[in-house]
Amino acid sequence: MKKYIFGNFKMNMSLKDTESYIEKFLPLVENSKNEIVIFPSFVNLMFAKQKLTASKVLLGAQNVSSETFGAYTGETGAFMLKSVGASYVIVGHSERRKLFLEKSDVINKKILEALGVGLKVVLCIGETKYERTNKKYKQAIEKLLADELKGLYENELKNIIIAYEPLWAIGTDKRPSTKEIEEVALIIRNKIKQEYSENSAKNIKVLYGGSINSQVAKAYCMAEGINGLLVGGASLNPQEFAKIANV
């Protein structure tokens, strides 16, 4: 069964680095049956698209503005990302929430902007260490889904992918167990069922993200209710990411 393997490069790689990376990476995944997407920095998007044109690897952006266009210095609109060849965009990443204080109302606007121009959205959600320790993660995840998918029609869910990234695991050596990941995947699907329908709950794509490497990738991909992986640091090494992408 096809898996969705996404690599978030974050604020790394120059133009030359990106070129070298893609040249090394593409031959390693040319026979993969999975949907593979890389998310370079904004300044490398157009160049990366040119390098990916003859491949099956798709392009994504790491963020998008909550506004359509106008006097928003430093922002990048959804239509701009679409125009340079992006197919996906990440919204609500834990680093955006923590470092840039993005709240659910802004994230909801970003989702609507992205969907409005035909981009697919990777919505990142997850609980804090406090919420996990105090067994409040179910309520936290359900609230994020309710608030951030507000206003979406059911037919728009086909362009939404939910990435579960527990905040306490990001950038650490700590990882949830397969059982814990499966439990959260079920929480997500049950909430989608409650808000929309059983069919939407069944079809929604759920990824896991957080301290992934090639040693644990297969086990997480095989977890019940998980359709793929959102990879951070390990995606910066083309050989390592290829191992993950070929699971």
Image (spheres, rainbow, N blue to C red):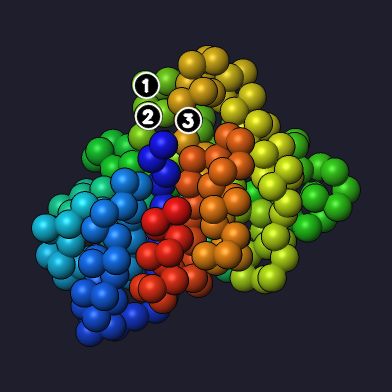
Nearer to us in this view, 135 or 225: 225
What is the quadrant of residue 85 in the picture? bottom left
Vertical side of 153 occupied by 49: above or below? below
Residue that extends furthest to the right in the rendered view of this protein: 134
How many marks overall?
3
Residue 200 lies, in percent from the top left, at 48, 21
For the residues labelled 1 and 2, say whether their Cβ atoms are less than 8 Å apart: yes
Label 2 packing within 10 angstroms: few (<14), some (14-19), many (20+) = few
Nearer to us in this view, 52 or 106: 52
Q: Nearer the viewer, mark 3 or mark 1?
A: 3
At a point 26% along the width and 54% down the height, the residue shown is 31
Query: Which numbered disc, 3 or 2, marks the residue that appears first in the sequence?
Result: 2
Q: Is residue 139 left or right of residue 226?
A: right
> Label 2 sits on what residue type?
Lys
Q: What residue does disc 2 label?
A: 158
What is the quadrant of residue 112 in the picture? top left
Mark yes or no: residue 114 visible.
no
Residue 155 is marked as 1
At a point 48% along the width and 55% down the height, the residue shown is 230
Residue 204 is marked as 3
Quarter of the figure with the N terminus: top left
> Label 3 sits on what residue type?
Ile
Residue 117 lies, in percent from the top left, at 24, 40
Mark yes or no: residue 234 visible.
yes
